[in-house]
Every structure is written in C-alpha cells, then in structure tokens.
Amino acid sequence: MVEHSGAQRSGAAILPRRGLVAVLIGNALEFYDFLTFAFFAPQIGRCFFPGTSEEDRLLLALATFGAGFLTRPVGGMLLGRFADRRGRRPALLLSFALMGVAIAGVGLTPGYATIGIAAPLLVLAFRLMQGFALGGDVGAATAYLIECAPPDRRGRFVSLQYVTQESANIVAGAIGAALAALLSPAALDGWGWRVPFLLGACIVPIGLVLRGQLHETLPADDATTIMTPGSGVDDYRRAAALGFVLLACGTIMTYGKLYITIYAEVVLHMRVSIALAATAVVGLAGMIGSLLSGTLSDRFGRKPVILVAGALVLVTTVPGFAMLGQQRTFATLLTVSGLVSLLVAIAIAPVLVGLTETLPARVRAGTVAIIYAFAIAVFGGSTQFLVAWLTKLSGSRLVPAWYMSGAALVSLAAALLLRESAPRVLRARRIARLRAPVSV
C-alpha cells in the first residue's frame, strides 16, 4: 500500500475552512444542476422542443440532460490528466469555470420561438460542456482532499463530497418546490424554470475566487511517495479494477435510492407531497450516513465499513420494499427510504477514499476521474431507466430492490478482494507485528 508525506502530512495547516469550501463547491454545483434540470425537464422540453407531443418533448429534454453523461469520461481523461501534470489548482479552476458557463448558458439561452433550432443545439452544447467539466472535477477534488487531509482524517475529508451532494439535492428540491408552488404554470414555463439555474450561476465567481487561493498539493516529483515492499504497477491496476466495480455498484445503489420517490408516486400511486417529503428524508439520511462513513472508515478501516454496510443493504432492501408495497403509509415510506439511504451512503464513501489514497500522486487525479466518470456514465445514466423498464416488463414491484441488492452482492465480492489502505489501521497492524513475540 501507499503512504504519503510532504504536503499531505501538513493538511490541517494548508487547508483552512474556506479552502475546504473551495474544493467542495464544485461537487455541490454538480448535483444542484443535476436535480434542477431533472425537476424542470417538462418546462425545458416545452421551451426548446415545441411542435411535438408532451411525451416527446419530455423525452427530448431528458435525452439532452443525459447527453452530459457521454462527455464525462472524456473530461475525466483530459482534465484528470491535466491535474496530474499541471497541478490540482489549475484543473479545479478550469473545471469550475466550465461548469459556470454551462449552468448559466442553460438558464440564459432563448427558447425555440426566439432563435429556432439554435436553441436546442445550444442547450445540448452546454450539457456536453457540463458533463466534460464534471468528469474532470471529481478526480482533482478528491486527490486534493486526500493530499491535504491529515492521514487519520482522510475518510472524513473525502466523505464531505457526498455530504455536499445530498445537501445540494435538498437545496435544489426546495427551490424547485417553492417556485412550483408560488408561480403559475404559465410563469413557470415562461421564465420561472430559469431562476434556479441563474441562482446556481451566481456562486460561480465566489467559487473561482476561493479556488484561486488554494495551495498546490501535487508533488514536484514522485519522491514524496513512499511505497511499501511489494507495491507496484500491478497493485495500482488491481486497485483501479476493484475501484471501478465498487463505484459502479455504488452508483447503482445511489440512483436506486433516488428512484424511491418516483417509485412511490408512479408505481405505488402515493401522493406527490408524500413522495417529495421522502426526497428530503433521503437527502438528510444520506448526509448523516456519509459523515458516519468517513469517521468509521478512519477508525476501523475502509474494507470493514464497506463490507458491513453493503451486507446490511443486501438484507434490508428487499424486505423494506416489500413492506412499503403492503403498507403504503407516510411513516413506512420515510422509514424505508431513510434506512436505505443511510446504509448506501455509509457503504459508498470508503470506496472513493481507499481508491484515491492507494494510487501514486502522478496518476491519482486522472485515474480516479476516469474510473468515476465511466461508472457514472454507464450505470448512473442507465439505472433508473432499466429499473422502470424491468418493472413494466415483469410486473414486479420489487425490481428496484432486487436490482440494488444485486449491486450490493457484487460489491461485497469485490470488497473481499480489497487491501486495506486506512493509515491508522495499517499503522496499528505494523505495531502489532513488531510487538508480537518472535518464535525461536
């Protein structure tokens, strides 16, 4: 395994609170934009794709939204490699600037009635730009957090990325629900849907200033990387392969838990207000689970946390969905959605931490960005569609639960092959070996 000195051992000194905000703000903007576009997809479809049926407009809007997933791997490869060659700070600045242009562009692009075919083409271009930027941001941001964090707090630092994801989802949902309640349908179609995009764009200048003040953490050379005997290229490839499997499974479980709201409304025919309340519970439980996950993985190791939480997801998801199908009450929905979200959040964060801290500095940001981008692009873009399609095909209301459980089972198999990377656990093992009696 790998340990790092230099910049990483002075994490508390070089990363003040505003620096932490600077790194995390890109992750927050990503998920804010994600949920905002999904929430207002009907209005966006009517604005940019007129002349078709309501269903076709919605599908075209969702296809435009999904196009951003296609450029994530490209952004991961180019911006991630840029972060490994030129530094974390310039990569973080570039990715966030592109995010700002993309989110403002969607909010400001005139509708089809004003500029014709140029309108949907511009929106498509901005979605592709957004995906490119997001694909590169996660690698640089995660590498920066690992390199700044004190070794015994890496889990807590990286888990904050997941906390910002959930909090951004809550904020976006609250803004969307408030606009839908306060504005008439005509006003919402005309200009109201643009408001949350422009609000998100307003934080971009602040984020750029904060990121511009970050210290660089990329070592001048690999002299700061200390490898234990037996580590090498094969170890990194092995870690990358297992990391992809675990992130893919984590993506399926994450998008599966986000599907609970749609499941409650469309499949179980529960009231929209109840389904929206479940969204808030999913976000709050995810925040709590992410914080717990980071702390627990620092104390007990990445591998035990992944195994225990993944096993709990496996044994609780199907019974929870079955109970929800039988007892379609507000309390049952909140209990099931909250518990599943909590366990999924605990299982996911240690994967990103373990993968990142295992990789050497010169390939860290690029490798993490590519693996994460491909996992999100392939499985994030397909999970909810496949779940809905399989539910319709089979007629079974338990399809989402079985799909998530399958992902949990695969993640357990991959986690068993992991090598522990938490510095505190590795240090304790070394001390135990040194203190062990020597046989004669």
Image: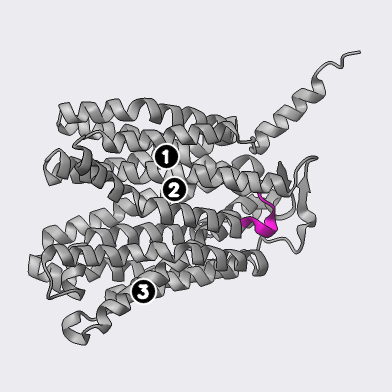
Q: Check disc 1 and report the residue beneath it.
A: 345
**Are the residues tagged 2 and 1 within 8 Å (C-beta)?**
yes
What span is colored magenta in the figure? 359-364
Locate the C terminus by quadrant.
Answer: top right
Badge 3: how crowded within 10 Å, few (<14), some, or many (20+)?
many
Asked if the stretch drawn in magenta spans residue 286, the answer is no
The residue located at (45%, 73%) in the rendering is: 98
Left or right for 39, reference 284: left
Badge 1: how crowded within 10 Å, few (<14), some, or many (20+)?
many
Residue 149 shows in the view: no
Q: Earlier in the sequence, mark 1 or mark 3?
A: 3
Separation of marks 3 and 2 at Cα, in angstroms: 25 Å
* Image vertical order of residue 205 relative to residue 26, above or below: below
Residue farthest front in this picture? 393
The residue located at (42%, 39%) in the rendering is: 345
Q: Check disc 3 and report the residue beneath it.
A: 126
Locate the N terminus by quadrant.
Answer: top right
Amino acid at circle 1: Ala
Residue 322: image location, x then y, percent: 23, 27
Amino acid at circle 3: Phe
Amino acid at circle 2: Tyr
Left or right for 324, reference 105: left
Q: Which mark is residue 162?
A: 2
- The picture quadrant where one finds residue 400 is top left
Residue 199: image location, x then y, percent: 30, 68
The residue located at (16%, 41%) in the rendering is: 267
The residue located at (17%, 61%) in the rendering is: 179
Residue farthest bottom in this picture? 115
Separation of marks 1 and 3 at Cα, in angstroms: 30 Å
